[in-house]
Amino acid sequence: MYNELVGLGFVLLNMVGVLVMYRFFGKTGLFVWVGFATVLANIQVLKTIEIIGLTATLGNSVYGSIFLVTDILNEKYGKKEAKKAVWLGFASLVMMTIMMQIVLQFQPAESDFAQGSLETIFGLIPRIALGSILAYLISQHTDVLIFSAIKKIFPSDGAFWIRNNGSTMISQLLDTLIFTSIAFLGVYPMSIWWSIFISTYVLKFIVSIIGTPFGYVAKRMTPQDEK
């Protein structure tokens, strides 16, 4: 139960973090969150854990928070602002990948102790990043479009949970399939890949449900810079 308890706390930390950034920095804070959360998710995903009886990768909590952020932006500021956040996350990931590949090319000093660890983490980033970039762009744009479409059918404030979860469940399934196929097929045995795929989607599903109440809080929140 240890990983499950820590995982629940980590999900709540991410969701509270989104609200804190929005409360104090408004829309800008949400854009910043998308940028660094995209980078962190692609580093965390390199670590595998056992949780709810399945082998899973980390990164689902922080990555799931990005979908919450784009839904908040879509809900309160419109589809254009949500798409801007998607492209900001994309640019952040691409720049991180390029810069860290250049960092690895420097010859380390004799006293250096970090090169090996950096190679272990960021040496795998190109394949991880390719899968993530494609999955991110396709799923996030799908999420924005589906959210907007559902909003036309269920426009009331009380139906935010339908818009939020409906768009996220579909787009996260697409995201998980694309990412795990590119990043892990051939790296792990098929049984492990299948376990990662299932567990990743289940965890994203759980994160989405947990994040919904935080979306309602954000809807009713007035950031300091908008008062």
Image (tube, rainbow, N blue to C red):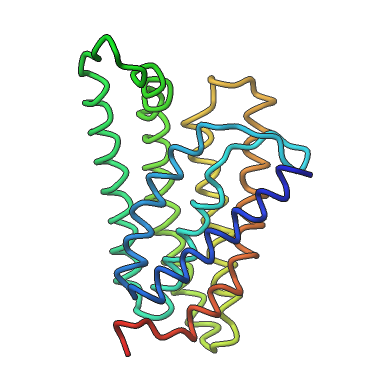
Q: Residue at x 36, y 51 (%)?
A: 36
Residue that extends furthest to the top in the rendered view of this protein? 110
x then y, percent, for residue 53: 78, 38
Quarter of the image with the N terminus is top right
Quarter of the image with the C terminus is bottom left
Q: Nearer the viewer, residue 157 or 93?
A: 93
Q: Residue at x 72, y 50 (%)?
A: 5
x then y, percent, for residue 76: 40, 81
x then y, percent, for residue 39: 37, 45
* Residue 142, quarter of picture: bottom left
134 w.r.t. 34: above or below: above
* Label total for image: 0
Left or right of 131: which side holds 83? Answer: left
Residue that extends furthest to the front in the rendered view of this protein? 111
Q: Residue at x 29, y 69 (%)?
A: 28
Q: Nearer the viewer, residue 183 or 35?
A: 35
* Residue 69, quarter of picture: bottom left
x then y, percent, for residue 57: 59, 37
Left or right of 192: which side holds 109? Answer: left
